[in-house]
Structure formats: structure tokens, C-alpha cells
Image (spheres, rainbow, N blue to C red):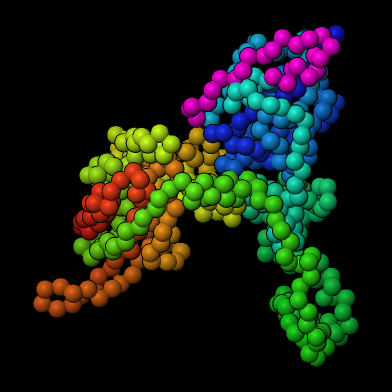
Amino acid sequence: MTATKSFLLPDLGEGLPDATIVEWYVKVGDTIRLDDNLVSMETAKAVVDVPSPVSGKVLKLAGAAGDVIVTGTMLAEFEVDPSLPQRAEGQDTGHHHGGGHAPAAPARTPEPETRTEAVREDSGTVVGAMQSSDAVRTEAAVAVGGVKAVPAVRAQARKLGVDIARVRATGADGVVTMDDVKRAAADGSAPIGAARPAVRDVLESSPAFRALPPEPRRDVAHNTARSTLSQSGKPMRTQPPGAVASGQPEQLKGVRRNMARVMADAHSKVVPTTLVDDADLHAWIGKQDITARLVRAIVTACKTVPALNAWFDGENLTRTQHPHVDVGIAVDTDDGLFVPALRNADMLDGAGIRTAIQRLRAQVEDRSIPPSELSGYTISLSNFGMFAGRYATPVVVPPCVAIVGAGKLSHDVVAVIGGIEVHRRMPISLTFDHRACTGGEAARFLKALLDDMASPN
């Protein structure tokens, strides 16, 4: 009897509850070899390729691009080919992204009449034994600007210089797929910055446009905008946008989906308190790397007051202070918030910090960052001031107990002995979990940080 194998979606990183299908590398009926890429999945942290756990014929695939698959439910089903390489019984599939996972549950010995059902006990599901089923939660791709596409496809479009609004969609219900974007990049049919065909077609079909001389036609075509005037220049009655144009609910996916969960969890568990003050940069000599200085100041403060470089377990009321400093640095993207970890910041000089930050940002932007790099930091930094804002109440995400927020640089009039001076200053906000550390510890931490930021170099 030919053996069949049901492959359950493994935990792709730190207990994530689900993942979104980006692109299948096979179709039903194909033969795939052990460890060849089976599917590209978008998790809350990254886009990862999931390898095949067996060699054999593909019998079933769970869902299509844009479908959300719950961790531990069926991802694919195979007809195992014993003549091709297979993984040894009980051997791990390799989907461990970080420590702390329990080993997979051992497979049960199936009864002969329930062979297909019994093989659900899949060694690739690294979160351990769990209830399994073939349930697939199908959700529409995120519709932004009238274009349906999953975040990973939008990220790929940006990377390839493709205007996703001009890409011909071939996916179900008009969803733009990864293949659509790659095809547009190859044939140059949708470069960023070009006018959208749909707008131009409507405009050029109007009698008023055709009556214009050539030069004004080009001006109008390239400067189309919303207006209360008709094409003939007369005022027209306006109406609110319809349900198709705006107001459609979007199902959160990927990074934003996880961000919503994390923020809600943090809000329910942490007792946050915020202190604010200004770092005086007047004594700085020459041009300096502000982010590198911030990281160095955080390291100094962590060494001075270790209580804030810690993890807190609210259920068991235990605190773990860390001898090293791993700084989680918030990175804002169109897909949502990423917080990669700058490891061993206490061992890096300014150049090392800058190199590491650039590497992390590049990996976040192209979604190649390993999930293990998005967790395990001991304290975090939000440099929101590079956009706007002076002070804030950043969110402390457990198990961390503190986050530093850096506001927008300003030139302030300050009082000095004998008069006043204009100093360049940076607003600093420190939010801490008051269950884990005292107000005095937080104030001393903030002072140590400010003192380090004020030093000349």
C-alpha cells in the first residue's frame, strides 16, 4: 500500500499562531524531493520558504495565495515515493527559529484503517503535540488603493521598482500575485512613476480632452486630480465615496496582525510609567552618529542600573537581569512595525553599531531577516524623532521592562550662569514596567543615559 503523508504547518517562529501563503512552488500532481522549497509563507515576522518534509507526489495543497493557515493544520499532503530520499523517522525538519521550543510529539502507531488520518502527527510541527484538522481560514488579500495583494507581494513590488497598481492581476478575485509582480518587472510594463492606464483611458476618452491641443493634453494627462469641476470646467454635484472606494474593512495579516496581538497583550499585562527629560548635545564635537550614540548611552545606563536591562515574569513574579545588552530597535515599514535585535551592543563600538543597524534594516526591508533576530532583546529603542514628535509613552513589550524613546532634535534656549545660550537638545522618554523596577531606579537610569549623551564624543 502506498503511504501518504500529511504535512502540518510548522511553527515558523516563536509560537506564531498562523501564517499567510505567499506563493506555492509546486502544484497538485508534481513530484517534489525532500527539502526542496514547497511554499513561501508570510509570518508575523518574515517571509520564509518552507521545505518539503518528504520526497513524493503532491496530492493536496491547503489554500491559495493570500489564505491564512493556522499553525498545526494541514499544509500539504503527499504520496511518499520510497525510491527517493526520505528523512529518517523522527528526524527534525529544521524549522526551529530560536530556542525554547518543545520537541515534536512522537508519532502514534496508526490503525490500518485510519492510516491517512494518523499521519497528521507530523514531526515538522515543532510546537509539540496539538489538535489538527484540515481547516483553512481564507481571508481576502489586503486591499490598499484599490489593489488586492498580500504584504510580501507589495514588498517585492517596491523592491523591483514595480507600480503594483498597474500590474495585471491573475490571482483569484483580482489578487496580485508574486508571479504577476515578477512578470511586470521583467517586461517593464508597470514602472513606478508612470501614469496609470485606467485613469488615462477614462481621461482621453472624454470629448473635452480630445478638443484640447497636443501640449495642453499632455499637461492635463499628467496632472489629473480630484476636482469639483467637470471636464467642461463647470461645477458638478459631488457625492461621498462609495463602499468600493473607501470604508472597506481590512483583515490584518502578517506583521500588522502580530503587532495588534502584541500591543493588546502588552496593554493588558504591563504597568507602564514614563519619565521624560532632554539630552543636551551642546558639547558634541563634530558630526556624530546619533543612533550609535543613543545605543551607547543605553548600554551605559544598563550597566549603571541593571534593573531596567531585564525580563519580568508577571505570573511567577520573577525578574531576570541580563549581563549583556541586546537592544531591540523599532523599524517602521509600510507592512507594520519590526523590532530586530542589535545583539551584544555592549561589545560594539560606534562603527560596529552602525554596520549592524544597516544590516538589520536592509534585512527588514527585503523581508529576509531570520525570525530569531526579531525576539530576545533585553531593552528596546524607538527613535521616532527622525519623523516627528518630542515626547512619547512608548509601549513596553513583555518580557522586557523598559523602552527608550528618542524625540525630534531641537534648538532650545537654556539658562546658563551669566546668561542664556541656544543648545541642541534631544527629548528622551523612558517608559518602564513599574512592577519590575522602582521610580528611583528608572530616574537613575535616565540620568546615566543623559550624562553619556551629553559627553563631547
Classify residue 386 by image quadrant.
Answer: bottom left
Residue 327, position as x, y percentages in the image: 38, 44
Classify residue 86 as left or right of residue 435: right
For image coordinates 84% across by 73% down, the residue present is 202
Q: Residue at x 27, y 41 (%)?
A: 306
Image position, residue 355 (x, y; %): 40, 44
Depth check: 189 or 386 in front?
Answer: 386
| Number of numbered labels in the structure image | 0
User: Can residue 233 be spotted in the picture?
Assistant: no
Secondary structure mainly formed by the magenta segment: loop
Instruction: Pick the quarter of the image with the N terminus.
Output: top right
**Position of 425 relative to 150 (above/below):** below
Quadrant housing the C terminus? bottom left
Which residue sits furthest left? Answer: 418
Q: Nearer the viewer, residue 227 or 263?
A: 263
- Residue 255 against residue 371 in the figure, above or below: below
Q: Is residue 106 left or right of residue 325?
A: right
Q: Is residue 160 left or right of residue 306?
A: right
- Residues shaded magenta: 98-121
- Residue 11 belongs to the span the image colors magenta: no
Q: Residue at x 78, y 40 (%)?
A: 64
